[in-house]
Image (tube, grey):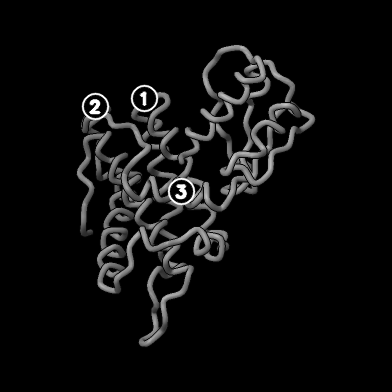
Amino acid sequence: MSLRDIANAIDDAAASLGGRPGTPAPLERTDRAPWVWVSAQAMRAGVHPPALADRIAGHPWCATATARQDGLLELRLSVAAVAAALRELALGAGMPPKPAGELGPLDPSSAWGAAAGLGHARAVRLAGQAGALGLDAASATDEDVAAGLTDPLEQALVVELLDAPRRLDAPVRASGVVGALAAVAAAYLPWEQSCPAIPTRPGALVQPYHRTRVLISQAGLRVLERGMALLGVSAPERM
């Protein structure tokens, strides 16, 4: 369940209300993301926004849906939807399957390349440390995500991760891919330093937020890996 899947579901709901055929409107972030996003689908399809909000409110990915005065739909995603989107990314799914090098190659020694490479290397290292403790991305439950996704740095990273597939794919331009990678890396690096994904004290127990962070880090690893591949840049495992 990606943001694109949700946008497609909203488009289908608009069509069921007699809306004009069209392309799904992408979900746009708000200052309350990763939980709250907005959609322009009602205006794009020419349907009554409150009617569309009522139609999608029953979907399992939607905690609440309201029509704003400006015609946008404000959607609060369910915990299950955010967790499912992270799991999909952690599997390397939901991103453009373009062949490596289609947009590049570009200079990996540039500022964005150095940040993306460092983020990828740290995510690889963290995956190894988590694996040694028996933690993997699949171990995080919806309840873990609900309890663990509270730190502002964590939320900022998740926003960039959930929005990355759209930015990597539309439009297909090297500058767009670079921008998405730079945003993910800029969010990942301070998060990785401030939000430990494994217990840091000897004998400390694994907490729900540890499992959530392993999931988030794995999603970051796959996003950085795919974006660098699109640009024809090798994703380093060590730096």
Query: Measured from the top left, where is residue 232 in percent x and y?
Result: 22, 35
Query: Measured from the top left, where is residue 115 in percent x and y?
Result: 34, 51
Choose the circle earlier in sequence order: 2 or 1: 2
Q: Are marks 3 and 2 in contact (CB under 8 Å)?
A: no
61 horizontally vs 17: left or right? left
Residue 47 circle label:
none
Residue 44 seen in the figure: yes
Res 7 → quadrant: top right
The crowd level at tag 3 (other Cα within 10 Å; few <14, some 14-19, many 20+) is some
Which three-letter amino acid code belongs to the residue tagged 2? Glu
For the C terminus, the quadrant is bottom left
Which three-letter amino acid code belongs to the residue tagged 3? Ala
Residue 102 circle label:
2
The crowd level at tag 2 (other Cα within 10 Å; few <14, some 14-19, many 20+) is some
Res 119 → quadrant: bottom left
- The front one of 192 and 131 is 131
Distance (Cα) linking label 3 and label 2: 29 Å
- The front one of 161 and 183 is 161
- Residue at the image point whose x is 68% and y is 20% from the top: 43
Task: Please say if 3 is above or below 170.
Answer: below
Res 104 → quadrant: top left
84 horizontally vs 202: left or right? right
Circle 1 sits in a helix, a strand or a loop, which is it? loop
Q: Are marks 2 and 1 in contact (CB under 8 Å)?
A: yes
Residue at the disc numbered 1:
172
Number of dots carrying numbers: 3
Choose the circle earlier in sequence order: 3 or 2: 3
Which three-letter amino acid code belongs to the residue tagged 1? Val
Residue at the disc numbered 3:
84
Choose the circle earlier in sequence order: 1 or 3: 3
